[in-house]
Amino acid sequence: MTAPEIHNAHCVTAEDDVASVVRNIEPGEVLSINRGDEPIKVTAVTAIPAGHKIALRDFKRGENVIKYGEVIGAASEDIPKGAHVHVHNLEGLRGRGDKR
Amino acid sequence: MNSGSDSVFMGYTRADGSVGIRNHLLVLPSVVCANDTAARIALQLNGAVYVTHQHGCAQLPSDAAQTKRTLAGFGANPNVAACIVVGLGCETIQAREVAEEISKITTKPVAHLVIQEEGGTLATTAKGVRIGREMLAEISLLHREEQPLSKLILGLECGGSDAWSGLSANPAVGNASDRLIRAGGTSILSETQEMIGAEHLLAKRAVNPEVAERLFSVVRHAEEGALADGVDIRLANPTPGNRQGGLTTLEEKSLGCISKAGTEAPLQEILAFAEHPSRHGLIFMDTPGHDIESITGMVAGGAQVILFTTGRGTCTGCPIAPVIKVCSNTPTFERMSDNMDVDAGPVIAGTKTIDDIGKALFEEMLRVCSGKSTKSEDLGYGSFAINRIGPTQ
């Protein structure tokens, strides 16, 4: 079955390795994402709620995640390309008194 | 009136040279114990506004000074044409002192009343209503005149953010802020905790190394507070609603938050909570991320108008300054149309650019500064909250 494409998942900069999806996404849907000047295609491997982020590459646990061209935190577990990136697998690095 | 002009607005010239965009009579309690009496006075005066708060007594000196600066700054704001300060009599922050501070900054009509001296609630209320009625008659004669944009101080605020806030509404507000500053005006960015993880970007725009270091210093102080408490900062920020909306980390929220400061304006100055800017252009004020406290601080510092972005939707208003709501996405804009003024959602849909929305927003802001009411004003919203440093003693 051919999954429908959408062209409106957003990256902020060409360096970003996550993108925000404009509507609820089901596993198997193919997203066409504008990163910099060249659209890229990524297949969702999990459900992703509208406004939430999709991984544009595989992340190893501990690797930094980039949005706005800047570090927004580090993967708290391995994240496959196409997965939902949120509080369950991405942690902030700043102000973390609990990590002291 | 020059509607549609992007170089002037219509405002009230005050004797101290500042310009009001509203003409309020404010009834202001100096202490929590005078809240009810202040409210009784204002409720009997058609056109008066009032605030209530929890402070003014039994505070550490640093907090008492900040509370007094906030109260006096609110009364001195150019949107306030006349002010009645109400105290109890035995409190740390006396009504007379607040009235004196307001009179140091401005020449507007200011009165103060002390409940214990006047002989209780009924006598104080009766006297306050008589004074207020005379003030209303006097300020009703004031009229709007053409004003340059250099007379405007804009407060930048976000609340109930979602993942789109940083992609549509915040950069659109930043675009409008850049337009105002190019025309000689001033914008205040605030919310120190929501600078954590993005401070290096704004510091690059500081006019000198001292301003950059002061920015790093206030952000470090905010972060050290969380570190010293040994808590996960995410239990406070991003908020549960932020996270449901797609924001994951504080760094992500901060990077979106600072886009309200636009892309070009140099950072001129770092202010303490409720302090007045001494320069024109982009200013940063050290406030909490808490919307109401942050807006209160900026308005006490002289901001006449607030651009407020939201993705989840909020209702917030300020008693003396119009708050213009800019929504990051069209579904929320439509669902909460009672509360939202401008839709930045077309940026996400790809049908409009940030520059398009920024221009429309700037023009709407000038209409509001010239007298057009905002949704939060129509609904009579007027929250007020003073940031505190330490515990009550």
Image (cartoon, coloured by chain):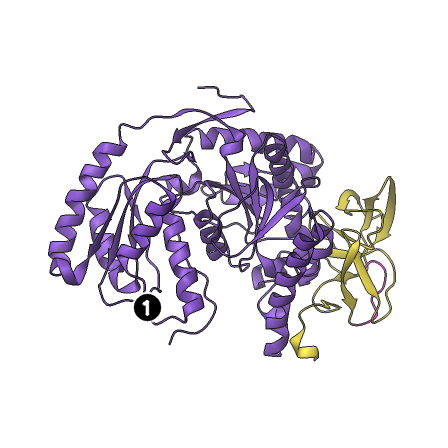
Chain colours: A yellow, B purple
Point out residue B345 in the picture as x, y percentages from the top left corner: 63, 40
Question: Is A26 placed above or below B353 here?
Answer: below
In this view, B28 is above or below B22: below
Residue at image position (72%, 57%) is: A48
Q: Mark 1 points at which residue?
A: B57
Residue B338 to residue A1: above or below: above
| Residue A80: in magenta span | yes
In this view, the residue in front, B20 or A43, is B20
Stretch in magenta: A77-82
Q: Which residue lies furthest to the top in this view?
A: B2
Residue B207: image x %, image y %? Answer: 69, 46
Q: Residue at x 31, y 67 (%)?
A: B92
Percent across and percent down for residue B51 are 33, 53
Place of residue B146 in the rendered image (x, y in percent of width and height, measured from the top left): 44, 23
Residue nearer the viewer, A84 or B88: B88
**Residue type, mark 1 in image:** Cys
Q: Residues within 10 Å of mark 1 (few under 14, many from 20)?
A: many
